[in-house]
Image (tube, rainbow, N blue to C red):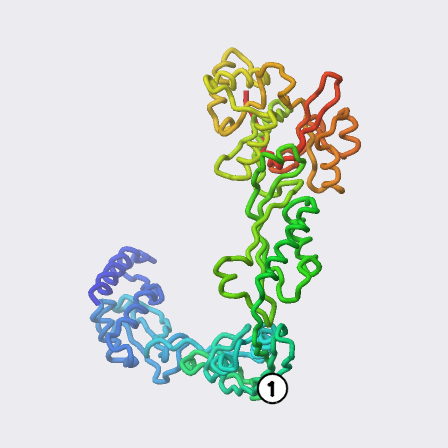
Amino acid sequence: MKKLLLALSTLVVTSSASTIVVSCSTKTKKQNIDSIERFLTAILHSKQNDQEPWTNDALEAELVNQKVDVTGGVSVKVSNEIKEGTFTNKQQSIVFIGNGTSKNIYKYSGSITLVYNFGGNKPAPKKKVTKEELTTTITGLKNFLDTIYFKSKNVVKNTFVSNANIPGTPAEGVVFKTVKVTILKSNESPDPSIPKFTKFKLNGSIGIKDNDSEYYEFDDNVTEQDKAFICEGTIVDSVIIEDKVITKATESINNWIEAKKFNDYDDFKNKLLAQQKEILANEQIAIQNITNLGITENNANINSLYWTNQVSVNLKANAGYEFSKEVIENEQHKIKTDIEILKIESNPLKWHVLTSRDKKYIEPQFIQFNSAVNTSKIQKEYLTSQQITQEWNQENDKHQQKQFVESLNIFTGDDKDEKIAKFVNTQYFTNTTAFNYGSDASESLFKVDEILFFDKSQENLNKNIESVLGQTKSLNEFVSTSKTLTKTTIKNTQNISYYVVFLTEDKDGNYKAANRTLNFLFQQVVMVD
């Protein structure tokens, strides 16, 4: 109340200062009472007993107490009709009338009608469970029973009980109201290697969970028939899978892998999943999932056209079968193996392309190798082992980098040296290598004299890449047969990735291609001289 009084007294002072003069006489225009609507509302809702409505006398006395005006300045007419509120249990309509005229000292004229909300907040409305949601719930239950097999009758009877949650895709707030389990006949086989399947029937109705009835209710048009369900499930006496089945499956997968080369990891994964029935040739098991464990390197395989990619193939038991405890504990159903892939899809290496005065500088010395990323580390090791690249001069790397930048003729003017010195200390030289810049001529070194860029969206991409790896041809032959781009024909180098093959020129003017393709993401850097 004291806070209200203080706020209101401030309002009154302000109102007095804002009195509008309409003539040179002493008559003044009274302030309309709707100008203090906010304060009147605050007074209404400051009532200590918020469970009861206001009376005329009590409210008029409170207005005087709060210094809104003197006695008789403001009259009120409270409604005796108490209605249900929008957000509260009750509400009351109240009219405030300012009795001020030019002939009295009262402050306000006019009238305003306000609503007093009282009686506590109304509870949130119950969520309606619709016919459509019941249909979805029953369909989800049937789909669940079609895909899940139970190990015993006791598990079934303990799962499907009154007030239990409904498996599948149930509507919010619903459970089994009634449910009955009926065991049907079995299809037992004399062959012990074939699992025994027993059908069971469920019938009952859907209801609202006991403790949630104040939050949920069925929509008005939901009938008892809409709540009813009948469906069937399966109990299986599983057969333990013998170890030799897993051993043979492992051998079959490895033999299939050894006989193939793959375009990339996704190519391997898709083909294995599509052909798993023929490869495994056993109805007891299937492939659960395949995981890419990343690029690795086999030094004995360094001259291959293909990267070594480690993968994990996890087997699962089909319905009616299960792995033994020993198999699971020893993770015999998890097969780790290597595949050979033509292209690395993930984690492309970042390649900064410098642009200056409408010219592009696509130099491998601006390729960044992140040693924290295994894929990047492996690709750098490959380039180093093939003598395609080497580290900057360890004794004075900045001096060598300055010489390299100067050879590009990007910077000019009297302060050229200062500009170059500043540039070689930027992020663009972080984790880069020299790519044989400044090295002595040697037949063993692979100097990058030209580069082939393969658009990832081109037709016959894999065939075109494979056709150039390790080959020696003229540049025109490479371009015409593989539909590739070169340093002079590539246009788009901003936030786009390409597969790249490096070329080195021989003494006859032909070019020899490196034996592997690498994955790069190009980012342009605008240079200001």
Count of numbered tags: 1
Query: Label 1: how many residues lie within 10 Å, few (<14), some (14-19) or many (20+)?
Result: few
Q: Which residue is mark 1?
A: 184
Q: Is residue 300 above or below residue 111?
A: above
Q: Is residue 401 above or below residue 313?
A: above
Out of 478 and 297, give the one closest to the viewer: 297
Using the rendered image of the protein, determine whether residue 355 is visible from the camera's viewpoint. Answer: no
Residue 149 x %, y %? 57, 74
Disc 1 marks which amino acid? Leu
| The C terminus sits in image quarter | top right
Instruction: Name the side, left or right, on which 508 lies relative to 62.
Output: right
Instruction: Name the side, left or right, on which 281 lies relative to 44.
Output: right
Instruction: Name the side, left or right, on which 367 lies relative to 74.
Output: right
In the image, what residue occupies the spot 62% across and 83% down? 186
Residue 505 x %, y %? 70, 21
Q: Is residue 64 above or below residue 490?
A: below
| The N terminus sits in image quarter | bottom left
Determine the image quadrant of residue 272: bottom right
Determine the image quadrant of residue 264: top right
Residue 410 x %, y %? 58, 19
Instruction: Name the side, left or right, on which 180 lies relative to 491.
Output: left
Residue 510 x %, y %? 75, 21
Q: Residue furthest top?
A: 414
Circle 1 — which element?
Answer: strand
Out of 131 and 349, give the one closest to the viewer: 349
Using the rendered image of the protein, determine whether residue 161 is visible from the camera's viewpoint. Answer: yes
In the image, what residue occupies the spot 44% across and 77% down? 125
Determine the image quadrant of residue 184: bottom right
